[in-house]
Amino acid sequence: MKKLIEYIAEAEKGGYALGHFNFSDLATLKGIVSGFEKAQKEISGEIALIVGLSGGERDFIGSRQAVSLVKSYREAGLPVFLNADHTKSLEKAIEAAKDGFDAVLFDAGREPIEKNIERTKEAVAAIREIDQGIVTEGELGFLGEGSRIFSEIPEAADWSPEKMTTPEEAMRFVEETGVDLVAPAVGNIHGLIAEKGGVFENPELDLDRIGRIKEAVVAAMVLHGGSGIKDEELKAAVSRGMVVVHISSELRLAWRKGLEKSFAGDPGEIAPYKLLRPSTEAIADMVFQKLKLLNSVLY
């Protein structure tokens, strides 16, 4: 089986994107992988799946336990890879690398660029000393925290034009840190912004900026906060150069709605695997649809 960095390079060359989906429990992971397997049968190209765990998700599931779960899929022939998402300390980055994660996102995006570069460069060096094959990623800008439904855009998020990543900043960051992947702030935020009527209205992406950053950097680009973005906008972001797209909040919402459906439909049921089935099925369908979207060029 090819390495993750090879799948990323092929996606970049082919003009499509790999999906990155976070999970917090086995039911979500099962749904994600089921959706990926279905997409594999319909997509003409060879794609890989990236699943991620934030720091909180790692604490809940267990770092080594998650590594074992994901490796079991690869042993069965499925190209599934595990990312240590939004790792904010050098200690946790080293821990993830030693535990066997396939990729590590070191997130110092809230820091001024000079400090961000310094800390990310240190983390990249430490990770590569442990295992040269681990894919390293750095983030520029702050996209807000928490996978939640918000009534308005978080005030601290760098989503306005004057706060977004510039091509010059991205080029400097990649050159000085040596990251394999770079996640810029281009109008994307974490979480979902709910407007009246339950419609999600996340900020629009700066597609022109994505294209200009793509021309300036040698690293592959990652779009965080992919939930709540309109389908055509996501497709346009991929066409401009995004190679990995993160989806989390929409999956969590599907998980919750599925569970609420179970509780309402059968108040007497107490078997977790039965109660969680609607959530797993909804997540599988969503992952399938997102992967079709991100890989539309391959159809």
Image (cartoon, rainbow, N blue to C red):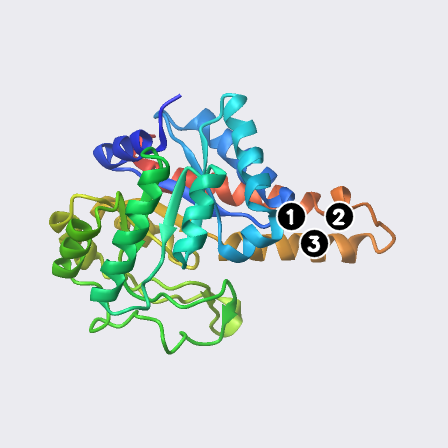
What amino acid is labelled 3 in the image? Answer: Leu
Which secondary structure, mark 2?
helix
The tag on residue 45 is none
Specify whether residue 175 is in view.
yes
Residue placed under numbered mark 1 in the picture = 279
Which secondary structure, mark 1?
helix
- Residue at 54 percent across and 40 percent down: it is 32
Residue 116 position by quadrant: bottom left
Tell whether label 2 touches label 3 (CB within 8 Å).
yes
x, y percent for residue 255: 62, 52
- Residue at 30 percent across and 29 percent down: it is 6
What amino acid is labelled 1 in the image? Answer: Ser
x, y percent for residue 245: 36, 47
- Residue at 38 percent across and 30 percent down: it is 47
Tell whether label 1 touches label 3 (CB within 8 Å).
yes
Residue placed under numbered mark 3 in the picture = 259
263 or 73: which is nearer to us? 73
**On screen, 293 above or below 141?**
above
x, y percent for residue 215: 12, 48
What amino acid is labelled 2 in the image? Answer: Leu
